[in-house]
Amino acid sequence: MTDSTILEVQDLKTYFFTRRGAVKAVDGIDFSLKKGECLCLVGESGCGKSVTVLSLLRLVAAPGRIVSGQVHYNNVDLVHCSEEKLRGIRGGDIAMIFQDAQSAFNPVLTIGDQIAEQMTIHGSIDRQAVKNKGIELLKEMNIPEPDRVWDSFPHQLSGGMKQRAMIAMSLSCDPKILIADEPTTAVDVTIKAQILDILHTLKEKRGMSLIFVTHDLGIVADIGDRAQVIYGGKSIEMASVSEIINNPGHPYTKGLIACLPDSSTDSERLASIPGTAPNPIDLPEGCPFHPRCAQVMDICRHVVPKQTIISETHTVNCHLFG
Ligand SMILES: Nc1ncnc2c1ncn2[C@@H]1O[C@H](COP(=O)(O)OP(=O)(O)OP(=O)(O)O)[C@@H](O)[C@H]1O
Ligand SMILES: [Mg+2]
């Protein structure tokens, strides 16, 4: 772990043990997060993004189980530390916001009660100080009439407002790392832009590190410093965002970039990657992308590619580079 690294994930695997067999949702994820950066986890639906971030805080419910790996934070391995230790870190040093703010709030408590509760779990006790700080946070989220919102119930707020209140709640303990799992999927374009803007400002102002989960490369280009591309539950390419977009190495990443709308002509490119994403209950042997890869070689069908260093800021797991 280098000085600037705040979180390091090694060989993380999380499987769901179902009657039909083991669903290998996460099957070998490695990445490191640097202080003050925004790292995007990107990949198509079902590739294991959410299960990865839930695993970081051991929030995967049965029949899911972390079967291997380590998550280092501050000399603590979050996979193996005590539940008590982890409880102090969850919602404290490491906070998470989810795709669906609606279900993350308790419908029978006011927004203020819920933010206050979150703050008191992790230490603050003075009620007035808690409320003042909470209202400040709502203001920081560009929420109009923060006093009224503090006393509102979740159903009294619009979706975008709830999502911003959710971010305020997650920030109430001054986290060092904020994990955001597709926080803009359920909101409209204007709110999406506002939320991305807020997260970007927070990162810059607080020096907070951000793990941003998305399937949208447009968002990655907008907010990310580095990106980790995931396919079939595995890390397949990691680089600075500009390298991922301008010089992708893995054939899958190349395919994703080819599917981006072309901003120079303002038209949708027609390219799409032929074939379908792998079924995590029956992952192909070797490289998970080999059945869809136009450059497939014999070795790809049998051997999982190891990580190859292309440059100081770029690694790829592909036999073309091995
Ligand atoms: N409780 C569960 N039981 C069995 N399989 C599960 C469970 N939860 C998730 N999975 C499977 O694990 C795989 C990874 O799911 P995950 O939610 O991490 O995908 P994702 O990349 O976040 O997708 P999306 O972009 O749609 O949110 C999927 O195939 C999913 O069906
Ligand atoms: Mg998800």
Image (tube, rainbow, N blue to C red):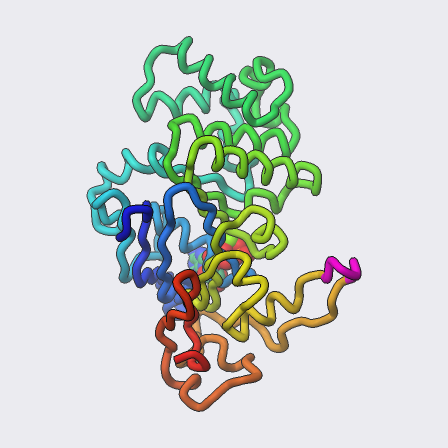
Residue at horizontal 73%, vertical 58%?
263
Outermost residue on the top side: it is 128
Is residue 234 visible to us here?
A: no
| Residue 235 image point, x, y percent | 42, 65
Report whether 35 appears left or right of 204. Answer: left
Residue at horizontal 70%, vertical 38%?
190
The one of 114 and 126 positioned closer to us in this rendering: 126
- The answer to whether residue 211 is above or below residue 68 is above
Residue stretch rendered in magenta on the structure = 262-267
Report whether 241 appears left or right of 117. Answer: right
Residue 197 lies in magenta, yes or no?
no
Outermost residue on the bottom side: it is 298
- State the quadrant of the C terminus: bottom left
| Residue 64 image point, x, y percent | 36, 57
Report whether 253 appears left or right of 66. Answer: right
Kindly report the secondary structure that dominates the magenta region of the rendered protein: loop
| Residue 166 image point, x, y percent | 51, 32
Residue at horizontal 35%, vertical 49%?
56
Is residue 259 visible to us here?
A: yes
Residue at horizontal 44%, vertical 90%?
298
Report whether 126 appears left or right of 210. Answer: left
| Residue 53 image point, x, y percent | 41, 50
- The answer to whether residue 111 is above or below residue 75 is above
Count the marks: how many? 0
- The answer to whether residue 245 is above or below residue 190 is below
- The answer to whether residue 49 is above or below residue 181 is below
